[in-house]
Structure formats: C-alpha cells, structure tokens
Amino acid sequence: MKWGDPEFSLVLLGGYLTVLTLLWSALLAGVGTWHRRFALPDEAPGTPLPKLTICVPARDEGHQIAACVRAARASDHPDFEILVIDDGSTDGTGEVARDAAGADTRVRVITGTPPAAGWAGKPWACARAAAEAHGQHLLFIDADVVIEATAARRAAAVLHNRRLGLLSLFGTWRLEGLWERIAIPVIGWFIRGVTDIDAVNAPGRAEAFANGQFLLVDREAYDAVGGHAAVKGEVLEDVRLAQAIKRRGLALGLYAAPWAFKVRLYRNLAEIFSGYTKNFYEGMGRRPHVALAALLFLAIASFLPYFLFLVAMLAPQLILTGVETPWAWQLWVGIVCGLPVVFRFRLDRNDGRSGSLAWTHPLGNLVLGAILLGSVLRVRTRWKGRAFHDGRAV
C-alpha cells in the first residue's frame, strides 16, 4: 500500500473520520457538565460585605441603558451605589439613564470627558467611574448587560470570602435578530471553549482571563496595579486588567453563571463582524501560530466534512474507488457532518434556547472563520467612532 493507492486513500479517510467521530462525541459528552463544573459558588459572606459601586461606562446606549440601570437598582446587595459614565454619547444616553434612575439617590449619572491621549474610550470611562466611586468593591458592567437581582451580592461574597483580586462571570446572551441567533452562540462558545478556566482560577498559573461584561474587583487590588491606567490604550482592557492583577500575585475567579445576567452584544451581522473583529486576534495575543491553528481546526473539523459528504454523494468514485459498500462510508460521513449540529442543539438547549437553529451551525462557523481571518488581516479598526491600531487606541 502506497501513496495514491485507493486502499491508502481509504485508510486516510477512515482515520480522519474516526478522529472526528471521537472528537465530537467527546464534546457532546461534556457539553452538559460545563455549567455545573465552573458554576459560581453560592456562598454566604463570613463578614458583612463592603460597599459596592456598580460602574457602567456607556456610549450611545440610549436604546438599552434604561434596562441596565433598572436591573442594577434591583440588586439585593446590602450596600451599593451605581455610577453611569455617559461617554460622549450623541443619542441621549445620559438623559435616558437619569430617567431610569428616577429619585433613587444611589444612582449618579456623570457626563464624561473625551479620552486623554493614549487612552481608549472604555478604559477612560471606567477610570472616571473608579475615581468617583465610594465602594471597596467595584463591579464594572457593560451598558447592554441586565443583571439578575442576586448576582452582585453572590459574586461579591465569593470575591470577599476567597480574597480574590478579581472575579468575572460568563452570563448568557439575549438574541433577537436572525444573525445574532446564528452566529453569536458559535463565536461565544468558541471563546469559552478555548479558555482554560481551571488554569485561570489556579493561583500558581500564569493564565488570566476576564469577561468585561461582568468584572468585579477589590479596590485594593485595582489600585495596586494602577487601575485602568495600566490598560489605558487596550481594546481588550478586561483581559489585560486580569493579567496585571494575576502578575501581582493576586488570585482570580472566573465562573459560569448563565442566570446572573443577559447581554445583547450586537444587533446585526455588520455589528457582529465589526465588534468581534476589533479584538479577536488581540485575544490570541496577536500570535500568528495560534490564529493559524484556529483556522485549521475550523477547516478540518467543521468545513471539510461537508465537502467530503458532497463528494461522497455526488462523485463517490473520487474517494470511494473499489469500495463494495459505499453507502456505509456515505452514512459515516453524514454522521460526522451531523454531530456538530447535534452538539449545537445541546448547547442551545443548555443555554435555554429552543435549538431550532442548530442546523445553521455550519453557517455560524463560516461567520466565525471570516471574523478570525478579518481580525488577523485588519490592522486598523473602528468601533463607535474610535480607531484602534493593532488592538490599541490611536
């Protein structure tokens, strides 16, 4: 048997299909355990919780800031305040936030100033919130986040009891448009899947990660690393802040809490592409070999099986020459194509979605591949009117 022989081609095909069958079967077996394995503990604080400041940087978020403020006001944390930093909005974000605050004196809406030279907009707004805050714990949430009433208290109890420098959560997505429902779960779970949460939570390991949608820090740890000034020009300021805190020798906590908050990230395909492209490659540390490995994985594990299925069905002589029972091989290739769809169905069901769009999983992977490639190739990006070059503010 040598290269070019039909037998050799069948051995290669059989080996490839075996690897993919085992891979997707393993992923299917583990999909139901992820949320339980990394769940945020439900701990009662050993001592009274320190005051909490919920910091909300907001730029042109008038369509959703009211829901964010109202949800934050409903928190059952025993002692908290809310700071909304209106970051140069042109859509009345500040006025909407003030209306949502009503007569609640715990809420302050502050008109921000343009970022200083070398600062990205979000770190600048977060630094302004921290400067105005009275809390020993600072909870940074995005303006598109709607937190559950117990989320801040439960997270603060874990941060306090375990003496963490920073705690961050993975929540769940609010998906309304078709492209949101097709692409965001694929992209979001890709990010979660490649994040080694065990290593992030291990004090002796260098790995660090944080999700800026819900990022809780102890004030002493925050000040010790210089606060957001330490990551002032970064488009990926949440991860960089976590890295700075862990380098300081402080512990991190990263947990799954789909009940804790919902977030509507983007509203259409253009926003999905622009929003993720600006920081996807940055999240890989701008390492070409990591991006190449991710692209190869998508090509080999997600795209190639569908190509082989078409060939096996329409021109079986090209890959199944001399096979007495080609239908068995066709069935096997079909099963390998179906396993990722079943995997997506289980992911959706675990996240509380119907699973009716699981069949679009290959299309979601195409969007993911385009975003990854675009993130590598686009040196300069724009988001909400601000420019970034190689992941840093211009």
Image (cartoon, rainbow, N blue to C red):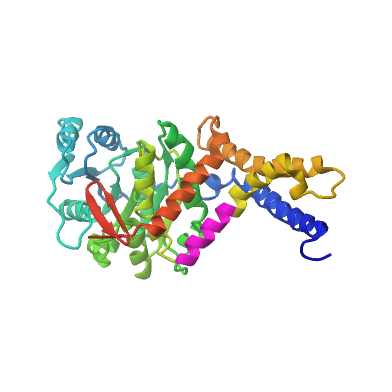
282 left or right, relative to 360: left
Percent x, y for residue 312?
A: 73, 43
**Image-quadrant location for residue 68:** top left
Classify residue 321 as left or right of residue 61: right
Magenta segment's dominant SS is helix
Residue at 44% across, 32% down: 178
**Image vertical order of residue 120 relative to residue 349, above or below:** below
Visible residue check, residue 347: no
Write down the region rendered in magenta.
Answer: 288-299
- Find residue 167 and report its horizontal and vertical position in percent: 38, 54
**Residue at image coords 27%, 34%:** 64
Where residue 154 sits: x, y (%)? 39, 45
Residue 2 seen: yes
Using residue 12 as the reference point, say whether residue 162 is left or right of it: left
Q: Is residue 291 above or below residue 212?
A: below
Numbered disc total: 0
Residue at the image point whose x is 47% and y is 68% from the top: 205
Q: Nearer the viewer, residue 248 or 49?
A: 248
Q: Residue furthest right?
A: 324
Q: Quadrant of residue 10?
A: bottom right
Residue 297 colored magenta?
yes
Residue 132 rendering spot, x and y as whole percentages: 15, 52
Q: Quadrant of the C terminus?
A: bottom left
Q: Nearer the viewer, residue 330 or 97?
A: 330
Question: Was residue 23 drawn as part of the magenta stretch in this picture?
Answer: no
